[in-house]
């Protein structure tokens, strides 16, 4: 099983700042098969990024993904109030399909 | 617009059973893999089960194998999850999720979830 470890657990930032979230895999993940999701309180997750760097339908370009192998990054270029949420990475190339434990982006 | 609406959750005693449903609309249901993903209270996301577009192939997490059964009725655009022999650790919000265009295990749309609480 591929274990995904996200860091930091919580990120304290101010609106307008840049956020960089890390997702590290216990084994190499084909870059085609790494996704990022956003979840706000009381809501379902929303797909942001797939294939490590492709934005999902309707996702603004302030969200970008990068990385390969075992190290992946989600970057939010300029935080807006609606971006404060929990973010999860997921690998979907190797069964069982696993999620990271999440990074919470909180207002400083 | 893609819509996924789950139902069937509730309070059940340990060892009990429930049948969760997910009504789909806004896309050609019969051509996509569908999945269940759960989230225990205050915890992260856990993939539970996936079924291919036709219902002929199913996949399960080890934690639910032998107790849960995923199925679909393409004539009714509905996904199901039969959950048996429930344990306290199965308490979670259960989300229905649509598979991606080319990757069935990428979840591109999610329902709002249905809460299953296992307690005596």
Image (cartoon, coloured by chain):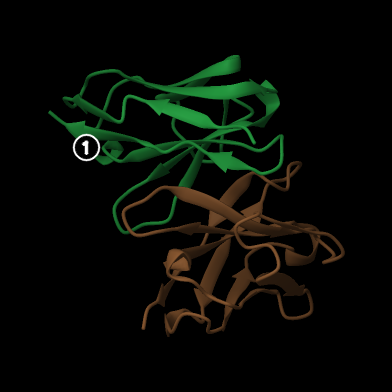
Chain colours: A green, B brown
* Residue positioned 52% across, 72% down in the render: B5
The quarter of the rendered structure image containing the C terminus of chain A is top left
Instruction: Residue A86 in the image: state x and y as whole percent.
Output: 34, 40
In the image, residue B11 sits, relative to residue B92, either above or below, namely: below
* Residue positioned 31% across, 54% down in the render: B42
Instruction: Residue A93 in the image: state x and y as whole percent.
Output: 71, 34
Quarter where residue B60 is shown: bottom right
Q: How many marks?
A: 1
Quarter where residue A96 is shown: top right
Quarter where residue A105 is shown: top left
Residue identified by numbered label 1: A81
The subunit carrying tag 1 is A
Q: Is residue B111 visible?
A: yes
Instruction: Residue A27 in the image: state x and y as whole percent.
Output: 64, 22
Find numbered disc 1 in the image and state the secondary structure of the residue it sits on. Answer: helix
* Residue positioned 53% across, 75% down in the render: B86
The quarter of the rendered structure image containing the N terminus of chain A is top right
Q: Nearer the viewer, residue B85 or B47?
A: B85
Q: Is residue B113 visible?
A: no
Q: Residue furthest left?
A: A108
In the image, residue A108 sits, relative to residue B4, either above or below, namely: above
* Residue positioned 82% across, 66% down in the render: B55
Classify 10 Å Cα crowding around label 1: few (below 14), some (14-19), many (20 and above): few
Q: Is residue B100 left or right of residue A75?
A: right
Instruction: Residue A92 in the image: state x and y as whole percent.
Output: 66, 38
In the image, residue B56 sits, relative to residue A31, either above or below, namely: below
């Amino acid at each position: 099983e591929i274990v995904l470890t996200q860091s930091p657990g919580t990120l304290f930032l101010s609106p307008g700042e840049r956020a960089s979230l890390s997702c590290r895999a216990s084994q190499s993940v084909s870059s085609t098969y790494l996704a990022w999701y956003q979840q706000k309180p009381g809501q379902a997750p929303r797909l942001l990024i797939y294939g490590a760097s492709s934005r999902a339908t309707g996702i603004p370009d302030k969200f970008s993904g990068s990385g390969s192998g075992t190290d992946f990054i989600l970057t939010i270029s300029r935080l807006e109030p609606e971006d404060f949420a929990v973010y999860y990475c997921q690998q979907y190339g190797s069964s069982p399909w696993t999620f990271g434990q999440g990074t919470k982006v909180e207002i400083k | 617009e893609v819509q996924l609406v789950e139902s069937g959750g509730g309070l059940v005693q340990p060892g009990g059973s429930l049948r969760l449903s997910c009504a789909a609309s806004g896309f050609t249901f019969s051509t996509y893999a569908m999945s269940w993903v759960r989230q225990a209270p205050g915890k992260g996301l856990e993939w539970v089960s996936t079924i291919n577009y036709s219902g002929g192939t199913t996949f399960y997490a080890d934690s639910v194998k032998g107790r849960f059964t995923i199925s679909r009725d393409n004539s009714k655009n509905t996904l199901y999850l039969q959950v048996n022999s429930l344990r306290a650790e199965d308490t979670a919000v259960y989300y229905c999720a649509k598979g991606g265009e080319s990757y069935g295990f990428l979840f591109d749309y999610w329902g709002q979830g249905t809460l299953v609480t296992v307690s005596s």
